[in-house]
Image (cartoon, rainbow, N blue to C red):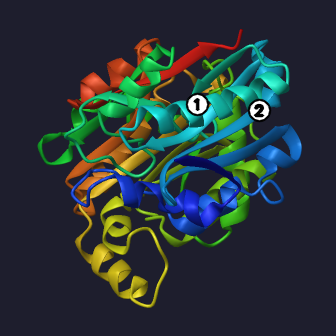
Amino acid sequence: MIELIEGNSHEFFGVPFRIYPKESPYVSPLKDDLVRSLDSRQNPLFLNHGEGSFFTVRRKGIPIGRISAHIHTASNERHGKTQCYFGFFDCADDPEAAKMLLDTAETFGRKRGMTEIIGNFNLTAMQMMGVVTDGFEHAPYTDQVYNPPHIPKLLEANGYERTFPATTFEVDITSLDPETLIPEDAHARLKEAGLEWRQLQKKGFKQLMRDTCDVLNAGFHANPMFVPLSHEEFLFQAQDMMWIIDPRISSIVYKDDQPVAVTVCIPDLNPLLKRTRSRLGLTTPWHYMRHRMNRKRAIVIFSSVVPELHGQGVAPSMLYRMIRSLKEAGYEKMGITWVGDVNKASLRVVEKTGGTPLHRVHLFRKDLA
């Protein structure tokens, strides 16, 4: 016998720990962050731009699957869609449970007039996105999705089809010479341009995050699926970054005291989350200090340059500075969050760094007839 439960965040968080083996590469977001993001009374995504809910399925009283369903109204309006998003689809290899979860998400969308369902979105295109379809043997970095091979099979068995192919990458920093990433005259040209480079640090963090949000919105404006974020939304997502950021490896650039470019690169927290089972407890500070002393992996969350400075050497200069800083700080590997197959420019940059594919990722969609 299986039963559907709605809105139990404790149970929702615990599903992957029950259904995936301990040796699985899967890493959960921090429990407090996950619960906060799903709370429609806190998350500006739901307060300002839509509605959502989340569900678990129990078999004989034991949670074996979960899914979220939500409407991102701002995305539908911007891109002319009537889509319902599903996210956090984690399920035992149990066809009956998977069907119940997916049917529930589809019904959520139909009742609200949606004609298509698509995911995973955890919760938007600027957060964790997609379903892993290859590279299951590789451990993900922070902000990269992961699922075992049976998840795409369960989706396809329920009439979902793959769309928007993308890839996550890993770069071996130890063998990369930063000088190969930037034209010889770039340093002099950028110096003449009057740019000021600052670190992303705890001091003045909220204003730095507002400036980062503005540069992100300007630089990503034309990207597929992108929806501009308000300062409120961005700060909600980034508020805990202040405690984990390594100011040596992220930077924001100003011209005439206006933000014009930013690279957000953070230490990979997944080894720490794996050891603590993504929970805050009495031993968390000890694990954190140990992790901080031995961290070797970092992840690029995003890099953005305002359109007025495109093609002027700012982007390669930021990449050069980031790689140089990572090497100097003792990092050895760098992850890159998903890059869509349609983004040829970013793929060329990844190729220049010698990045190797980590996971193949797709969105999965279905018409809601």
In the rendered view, tell whether residue 265 sits above or below residue 169: below
Q: Is residue 44 left or right of residue 152?
A: right
Q: Is residue 320 left or right of residue 363?
A: left
Point out residue 122 in the picture as x, y percentages from the top left corner. Answer: 58, 42
Of 315 and 342, nearer the camera is 342
CA neighbours of label 1 inside 10 A, class few (<14), some (14 to 19), many (20+): many
In the rendered view, tell whether residue 42 sits above or below residue 56: below
| Outermost residue to the front | 1
Q: Is residue 130 visible?
A: yes
Q: Is residue 67 left or right of residue 111?
A: left
- Rounded to the nearest angstrom, the CA distance separating label 2 from label 1 is 15 Å
Q: Disc 1 marks which residue?
A: 102
Question: Residue at the location (80% across, 50% down)?
Answer: 44
Which is more N-terminal, label 1 or label 2? 2
Image mark for residue 71: 2
Of 234 and 248, nearer the camera is 234
